[in-house]
Amino acid sequence: MTSQRFSEDEHIHRDLESLSVSKRLVRSVSQKLKRKNNRNEGDEEDERWGVSLRCLTLYSRGAGCKVVADTGEEYGDPGSRRRSSASEDGKGYPPICGNEEATVDCFSYGMKEKFWRRNNRRLLTFDEAQQNNSMNSCLPDDILEMCLVRLPLTSLANARLVCKKWRNLTTTSRFMQIRREGLFQSPWLFLFGVVKDGCCSGEIHALDVSLAQWHKIESQILRGRFLFSVASIWDDVFIVGGCSSLTNFGRVDKSSFKTHKGVLVFSPLTKSWRKAASMKYARSSPILGISEVSKDCFISRNQANLSDRRFYKSRIGGVSDVYEDPHRLSVRRQSTQSLDESDISSFSSIKPSKFVAQKTENSRIKNRRKFVMIAVGGLGSWDEPLDSGEIYDSVSNKWTEIQRPPLEFGVACSGVIFNGIFYVYSESDKVAGYDIERGYWVRIQTTPCPPRVHEYYPKLVLCNDQLFMLSVSWCEGDGQIGRRNKAVRKAWALHPLYLTWTEVSIHPDAPMDWNAAFVSDKNLIFGVEMFKIFGQVLDFVTMCDVSDAGINWNHISRNHVAQDLDASSCMTKSLAVLHL
């Protein structure tokens, strides 16, 4: 009997020795899992949610793991049962393997974390929000704003997707002003009016000049509209006029079409659209000029007085514009006096509260920057050439009809605003200027314009406070298209004092595009040419710096846009440039 007890004690002692070996293994595994899963936080969350995910502790009475429970039954303790580490009964027993940290994970590797994440998704979301808030709270808003303002435009667009705080911080007017006034911007080219599979898809192709990367922007609001003109200022692009088919919506079809007089405004920084005031007349392909003016520049009163007047060519026996209607001046003076009296009477009837509100509104308008945009010519609703014009005031958001261009000026084909004068070049090689503040046209007598191929319309560009014209001319001899005479595209500069044209540069590419688009940004001139050859539409983007001693053109992009476009895109395209 004593020998039997001795054998049993020896057997138990041997089992304990085997358990001591397992103790070292358990301790190492437990420490690794503790470092990986951060057990301290897990314990607190388990107590909060009432779910124990700790591995089951080995207790001296067999509670915990199933292996120990089976061992307990072999020891003759059938009353023993499995107890978890979270149960109150199991906490009072001393562990076999030393301290409580020496535990066995009853879940397979990685299952504990997966099980905990599945049952605590809301808590994880809250923790992530807390981490984001703590990250944002580490930096003051001013420092965070200065960091974000230095990002390129593409990176800035991605940063706005991080959180609402970053989005709100990068869309304020103060942030835009800091970015505009700093040296953190680069030129971007925006190509509008492309045609794909016979339809005006409304896609906008944007080129980041600094990185030479193209981006595509979807715009359903432009779908189906073609032959519109674009003008850019500050951070916005204005889309003016255009046509759309009535029978085949979305397709370039002028058999039955509608001419628009609406104006859309696109903001690339926020990828948002808004509507501006519509023009008085529907136009397609109008000639646009846009420029910032002083806040004291009055537009509406000047244009109202001179909207019906024209500068007629002097001729013998003719009558002047004033004396053909001797009562016009007196009628205008009476209307002005009556307007002043009505203004005084209206001011006397205004209540003090309304006057204060109006004064506040006027002060708010004065703090706003002001620009004007002029639309001249184009085609009307019946596809007839228009010789009228109108001007847009950004503060009042109104269009006002202006004086018509001089007689025998011809059809306007290009224009640009320079020093408060809207210079317009006509198909008959004449130049006229519209004085914005005074509200009348002036003929500009330049030296004989450079000889050009009349099938290619010249383009006026303002760059580095100098007026340039790009036209196509023959290198040698006189001839017509189809002859072997070589035609090149040249850049001419207009002398501001002597009004003479001087050749300054020759474009490296052959003039294959009849409707090449040219825009300028500070001291850079950009050009986009698209043409179809051998059944494929090709595109070239070139750039030149006029501040250099020798004005040379460089290619910055080739055949990246027009591969999937139709040949009609060559005539419907429009180009704008922004410094973003």
Image (cartoon, rainbow, N blue to C red):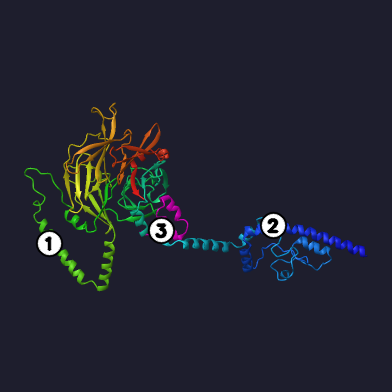
Residue at coordinates 12% horizontally, 44% vertically from top-left?
A: 313
Mark 1 touches mark 3? (CB < 8 Å): no
User: Which residue matches tag 2?
Assistant: 28
Task: Please tell me how crowded label 3 is: few (under 14), some (14-19), or many (20+) other residues with Cα within 10 Å.
Answer: some
Q: Which mark is residue 179?
A: none
Residue 79: percent from left, percent from top: 80, 68
User: Which residue matches tag 3?
Assistant: 145
Q: Which segment did they paint magenta?
A: 144-173
User: Which residue matches tag 1?
Assistant: 334
What amino acid is at disc 2?
Answer: Ser
Q: Nearer the viewer, mark 1 or mark 2?
A: 2
**Sequence-wise first label, 1 or 2:** 2
Which of 522 and 220 lies nearest the eye of the viewer? 522
**Which quadrant of the figure has residue 39?**
bottom right
- Using the numbered discs, state the Cα–Cα distance from disc 2 to disc 3 in whole angstroms: 48 Å
> Helix, strand or loop at disc 1?
helix
Residue 467 seen: yes
Task: Please tell me how crowded label 1 is: few (under 14), some (14-19), or many (20+) other residues with Cα within 10 Å.
Answer: few
What amino acid is at disc 1?
Answer: Gln
What amino acid is at disc 3?
Answer: Glu
Q: Nearer the viewer, mark 2 or mark 3?
A: 2
Which of 150 and 19 lies nearest the eye of the viewer? 19
